[in-house]
Image (cartoon, rainbow, N blue to C red):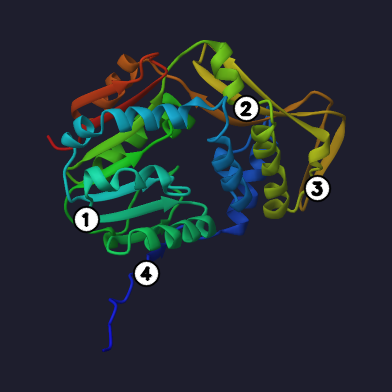
Amino acid sequence: MTVYFPHPRTPGFIQIHRHDAAAVRAELAAGLLGPVACTAPKYLYDALGSRLFAAITELAEYYPTRTEAAIVARHATEITATLPREATLVDLGAGNCEKAARLFAPLQPERYVAVDISVDFLRDALQRLQCEHPQLELLGVGLDFSSSLTLPADVGAGPRVVFYPGSSIGNFTPTDALAFLRQARDAAQGGAVLIGVDLVKPVSVLEPAYDDALGVTAAFNRNMLLHINRLLGSNFDIAHWRHRARFDAGHSRIEMYLDALQEQRVVWPGGERLFRRGEAIHTENSYKYSALAFEALLLEAGFSRIRCWTDSRNWFAVFTAQASA
C-alpha cells in the first residue's frame, strides 16, 4: 500500500525593504554628525541584534514580555472576543514570531503575515513556524514600517488584526506614535489592532529592564556599532564604548546611550567625528504611558470600541481597538 502525504506548505515571502546603501550611509552619517550623535533604533536589529533581543526577553529584569504574555493568557477569551475571527493576523516587528503564535489557537487566523526589517532572521523563524503549523498560510514581508506602514496587496483583502506587541510603540515619539496608529488603522482594513503598551512605573523597575546585570542589553546596544561599521564603513571599537540607560521623567521615557570611555576619532568614507570622553550616542527611546493617555491616543487616531487589560501591578497594558467606524 502506498501512502501519500499532503505536500507541506512553504512560507511565502515578499521583500519590500530594499537595501539602499547610499541612503543608509547618508542617514547614519547625518545622525552621527548631529549636535548630539544619535542613531535610529532599527539599526539595533541586524541578525545578531535580533537574537540578542530575543535573549533579553528571557531576562529576570525584563518584565514586558512575560507580563504581556500573562495578560494575554489570562484574558485570551475576552481579548479575542473583541477581534475578528478567521482574519489575517499581521504581526509588526515579528522577530521570532513566538508572541503571535500564542494567538493562533484562540484567534484562528486565516493567514499569518509576519513583518520585520531583519529579513534573514524572519525567514528562519517562518520556516520553523511552518513546521509547527503546516496547514496555516504564512507570509513574510521584509519591510521597514518605521517610516511608512504600507502593506502589499498580496497580504489579502478583508479585515485584519494588526498585532504590535512588546510596547514597541514606545520607540516612537508621541507625535510619531499618533501618525503610526493612523496608518495601522488604515492597514487593518476595517478590522482591529491588538497592541501592547508599557506603563509608567518606579524607576527601580524601569532602569534595570534596560540595563540588566548579565549585560545582555549592553551587548545588544554595543552590537549596533558593529552593524554601523558594516553599513557605513566606520571604525567604531566597541571596547571603547559603554552602555547606559536612564529614565527621563520629564519625557516619560527610557533613554539608551553609548558613552565614549575615552577620546577617539571615528572615521568613515567622506566623514569623521571626534568623540570626547563621556560624549554619548543616543541609540533608543522607549516611551511609557498611562492607560488613560494611550486610550486618548487611540481615540485621536480614529479607533473606536477600545478595551484595555492590565496586570495586577499595572505595569503593562494590552489594548484592542476597532478600526471600523
Q: Residue furthest right?
A: 263
The amino acid type found where label 2 is placed reads Met
Which residue is identified by label 3? 235
The local secondary structure at tag 4 comes to loop
Mark 4 — residue? 10
Residue 308: image quadrant is top left
In front of the other: label 3 or label 2? Answer: 2
Crowdedness of circle 3 by 10 Å Cα count: few (<14), some, many (20+)? some
Give the residue number, with chain letter if any, for mark 2: 256
Point out residue 295 in the picture as x, y percentages from the top left corner.
28, 21
Please tell me whether residue 235 is drawn above or below residue 295 in the rendered image. below
Taking the image as shown, residue 2 lies to the left or right of residue 39, namely left
Classed neighbour count for the residue bearing mark 2: other residues with Cα under 10 Å, few (<14), some (14–19), many (≥20): many
Residues at marks 3 and 2, CA–CA distance in whole angstroms: 21 Å
Q: Residues within 10 Å of mark 1 (few under 14, many from 20)?
A: some
| Circles 1 and 2: CB atoms closer than 8 Å | no
Can the viewer see residue 223 in this picture?
Answer: yes
* Viewer-closest of 278 and 31: 278
Q: Secondary structure at mark 1?
A: loop
